Image: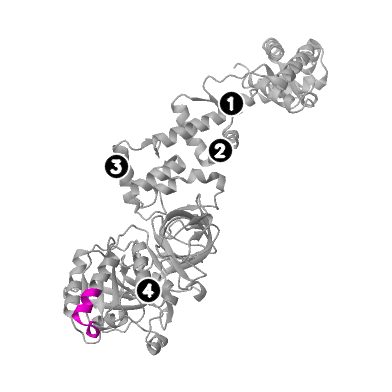
Amino acid sequence: MLVIGTAGHIDHGKSAIVKRLTNTDPDRLPEEQARGMTIDLGFAFYETPENETIAFVDVPGHERFVKNMVSGVGGIDVVMLVIAADDGWMPQSEEHFQIVRLLKIRNGIIIINKSDLADAEWLDLLEAEIKEKVAGSFLENAPIIKVSAITGDNFEELQSYLHTLPSKIKSQRNIGKPRLYIDRTFIRPGIGGVVTGTLRGGELTVGQTINIFPANVEAKIKSLHSNNADVHTAVPGQRTAVSFTGVDKSIRERGGVILADQNIDQVFENKVLALSIEMLPHAAVPLEDRRRMLCIIGTTEVEGEVRLLNTKYINPGEQGIVFFKPDNPLYALLGEKYIGRLPTPMVTIGGGEVLDYLPYFPRKKNYDSFGYLQERTNLTLEKLILTELQKEFILPKEGMLPLADFSEKAVNNQIKNMWQKKVIQIFEGHIYFEQYFKDAITVFKQEIEKHLEENAHLNGLLIEQIEQVSTLQNSKVGIFLKYLISTGEILKTNDKYTPTGQEMVLKGAVKNTYELIMNELAIQKYTPPTIKNLIHLGKQGRNAIRFIIDTSQANKCGADFLFLTDAWNEIILFIKDSLQKNNEFKVSDLKEKFDMSRKYTIPILEETDRRKITARSGDIRIKGENFES
């Protein structure tokens, strides 16, 4: 199904043209019929001789209903720009033209209506003016057809042209991410709640579970209706009515979105949208930093605050990047088009593309890290992948860009193509762009090295410690470490990571405390002071003890004591020799040999029990499981 949207100034005959073509009055509301003015969107269908269906979306021309106009043209294939012969190019002609241009509509036709009210010379002058207005745009080579909706004059030419469109224009893309922006909602007896819209991005099927955004409520599709018939499956580009049961009326409102499960949680978690903006040449005012703006995507219109990237103003005719925080959740795919309007005065100022989702407004001191957004203007899939790697450094190859306006298959094919051309590299199922990744790897390694230099008593870092030390996202620390291990730049010993060649060298207060502790342990070789007494030396004491243990200069005995390694080995050797000779060992044996009290003998034997060198049997010790080892 091809979708054509009308555009143009109020009372230029948009609805009249649709009615003559389809025999359907798109002005369905009583108020519209009484006033002779389109207020809301109207819909009608036209069948070509080849049984192709063309859906017309008729939009209002009055300036007060521009948001309804934007809602109507958001999902169309072709725009029909209507200009009345007696009025010529008017303010809403200009505004509607700029809106469809900003929404990147690619196909169009220009209709000069009311040709019966002007002579041939005037019509030629008007045609020349229109060509000047649309020069350089997608309408530059569009046909200009002169008709009269009242008399029917020249409608044969218009119909002949319409009949050629289905074969010339590709149907809307099926990217496996269906979304239907709700433009009407009503109750139908025997069916229940119904919503309508133009389906984009993927198919909907009867029985499918969908999500109603922003309420974030799941429902099951009861029936689908398109082109005056029930259908089992609706495809992109179709005007579609969807019914479901058990859904409260309050969440079936216009502006909501019907979605499959498309990473909705990410939208709620990332409440700020990065947008490109092209200001209209004749915008009433510049866009100021921290100003309020209305963002219209599909039928969703949300007001919010704007922050500008590296500037205080974006003037009419200029382009820039804005951060937009909507007052209510706003669903869009990366690359999707939007229109920006001011709430006061109520005027259209520009539009552009959705470039990214962010968790919060960036701080100005971090604006330099958002340079990748500039690369995303006029977005292509390759550019999107590269800028995502510029931002994230390395990413899993599978499931990339779930919120992009591209299919999963297209993303995977593009990744494969870029890898084959050596644009990107792959490591353990992750992709990276060498320059961005190597720069990040260098910073990451330097952060670890610096921390170990400042804390030379540490014999490597646990992954949890690295997560605290590094500015890298925690989720990426693991894959960064794996890469550095694979290149030999990081060594992993047990569960600790150390840069290759980095030695533990004490200095300053920790070194002085270390020497003090080692001296005390040497003086009281078999009856050392408790760890508690050593820790009273403060942070330096704790760090020195950690260094002594990590470098195997002492052995920890339970929670209370440190024994110098040679003293500990001497104690263990005596216990093992005694067991080897007598097959049993008593507490008193240890006490007599080393002249120590139960304060020491009990913890020592509990430690050897824990290590399974010994095993307790009543009041004596026997050989444990690890005795031989």
Main SS category, magenta section: helix
| Colour style of the rendered protein structure | one colour
Badge 4 vs badge 1, beta-carbon distance below 8 Å: no
Sequence-earlier tag: 3 or 2: 3
Residue under circle 2?
471
Do the residues under discs 3 and 1 have CB atoms within 8 angstroms?
Answer: no
Asked whether the residues under the numbered discs 3 and 4 touch, taking CB atoms below 8 Å apart as contact, a structural biologist would say: no
Q: Is residue 593 above or below residue 48?
A: above
**Earlier-in-chain disc, 3 versus 1:** 3
Which numbered disc, 4 or 1, marks the residue that appears first in the sequence?
Answer: 4
Mark 4: secondary structure: helix
Q: Is residue 370 magenta?
A: no
Is 404 or 587 nearer to us in this picture? 404
Instruction: Give the residue at the far bottom of this rendering.
Output: 34
Q: SS of the residue at dot 3?
A: helix
User: Which tag is nearer the camera, tag 3 or tag 1?
Assistant: 3
Span colored in magenta: 115-125
Point out the frontmost of discs 1 and 2: 2
The kind of residue on which mark 1 rests is Gly
* Residue 256 in view (yes/no): no
Q: Find disc 1 in the rendering and name its residue.
A: 460
Element type at marker 1? loop
Counting residues from the N terminus, which is met first, the one under dot 2 or under dot 4? 4
Label 1 crowd (10 A; few <14 / some 14-19 / many >=20): many
Give the alpha-carbon distance from disc 2 to disc 4, as whole Å.
Answer: 51 Å
**Circle 4 sits on which residue?**
92
Alpha carbon of mark 1 to alpha carbon of mark 2: how far?
Answer: 18 Å
Residue 123 magenta: yes
The mark found on residue 417 in the picture is 3
Q: Amino acid at mark 4?
A: Gln
